[in-house]
Image (cartoon, rainbow, N blue to C red):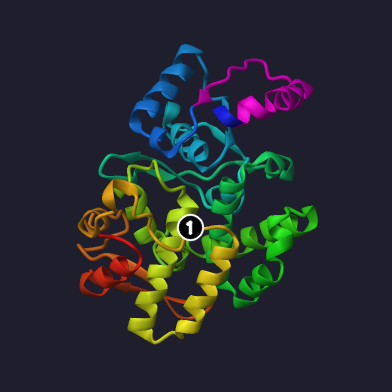
Amino acid sequence: MIDSQVAALHQAQIMKWVNLYPPKHFARFVFPSGESNKNLDFFQQVIEFLVGNEFSRALNLVAIGGGVVGDLTGFVAACYLRGVNFIYCPTTLLAQIDAAIGGKTGVNLPEGKNLVGTFYPPKQVICDSYFLTTLPDREFQSGLAEAVKHGMVCSEDYFNWLKENADAILSREPDVLNTLVTESIRLKAELVAKDVQDQDCRQWLNFGHTIGHAIESATGYHHYLHGEAVAIGMIAAMKLSEEQFGISADKTTELIDLLTKFGLPVTLDSSIDAGVKIEKIISYLKLDKKKRAGQLKWVLLKKMGHPILISGSLEDSLKPILLMLGAR
């Protein structure tokens, strides 16, 4: 499975790698880029492609692309013949530091993001900075949102390192990028190892994602990249943290400043259909897959690097925050 944009840019190089150790039976499925294509229709198309090529349980199903391709391929690997080997070569910054770590797979439904899926960790993850050299600026910046999240949730020292090295990161200096990818993977992997099934501390990594996923869903997965929606969601989560736990507003300002430096949005785009509707965002929050006993779970911060999970709707608190962020 290969992302169409990656195939267009790197097909020759990828085939050189394949031909170094040619498999006995090889077939390529080019997946059209975009979150909106991560759905059950394409899941079925890939399954039928594998059946048509008569692949057995000895199959090594390789995903080459970003988080969308990784999520879909991993879900297919978990289901095809009740499970085949899954190997992931993430080609975006977002996928290298987030999607490839932890084994979450799945597809979207019209009602919400990642509502169908399973945990199916890849047998191997291959992160190659070669792919980051041709990553469009917007995609690269989207990935930085997850690095910022790791700093907010796991390590204020890492957050400060991101601030101090922001210019070098944006210039994609190889040594700095290697440090960023390595440290983000380490921080996420530590939490995943403690809570593989996402029942406890791993949920801290959802900081900014509860609202971020709702924003993606409310805008049909067309307007915001994942990291862009998460950036806005983190600001909302910080505003809730100020209200619920008294975290300093200065920390929210630091977050806004770093996200802005990285070229990420800090408010909603009012030009989308005359603005993103507050009620539409809240309607998607009610479908969040991490609800327990009808209660939505929120990841907030008592202070930098010290997250806490709380349950509840928080609608009354959330509505003025969404209004401040540009929802209507």
| Left or right: where 230 falls relative to 151 | left
Q: Quadrant of residue 203?
A: bottom left
Q: Is residue 300 above or below residue 110?
A: below
Hey, which quadrant is residue 283 in on the image? Answer: bottom left
Compared across the picture, whether 38 is left or right of 126 comes to left
Q: Nearer the viewer, residue 29 or 125?
A: 29
Closer-to-camera residue (188/31):
31
Question: Where residue 223 appears, x then y in whole percent?
Answer: 40, 45
Counting from the top left corner in percent of width and height, residue 219 is at 33, 46
Q: Position of residue 110 (x, y in %)?
A: 27, 39
**Where does the N terminus fall, quadrant-wise?**
top right
Query: Image quadrant of residue 221?
Result: top left
Above or below: residue 285 compared with residue 113: below
Mark 1 residue type: Val
Q: Residues within 10 Å of mark 1 (few under 14, many from 20)?
A: some
Q: Which residues are magenta?
A: 6-31
| Residue 258 seen in render | yes
Question: Quarter holding the C terminus?
Answer: bottom left
Q: Which residue appears at 74% of the width and 60% of the height?
A: 168
**Residue in view at x 33 percent, y 82 percent:** 244
Q: Which residue is mark 1?
A: 196
The number of discs equals 1
Q: Is residue 222 or residue 293 the one in the foreground?
A: 222
Residue lying at 28% horizontally and 67% vertically, measured from the top left: 323
Indicate whether residue 289 is drawn in magenta. no
Q: Position of residue 236 (x, y in %)?
A: 38, 69
Asked if residue 1 can be seen in this view, the reply is no
- Name the residue rendered at 35%, 40% in the picture: 108
Q: Secondary structure at mark 1?
A: loop
Front-lying residue, 54 or 2 = 2
Judge from the rendering whether residue 13 lies leftward or rightward of residue 107; answer left or right.
Answer: right
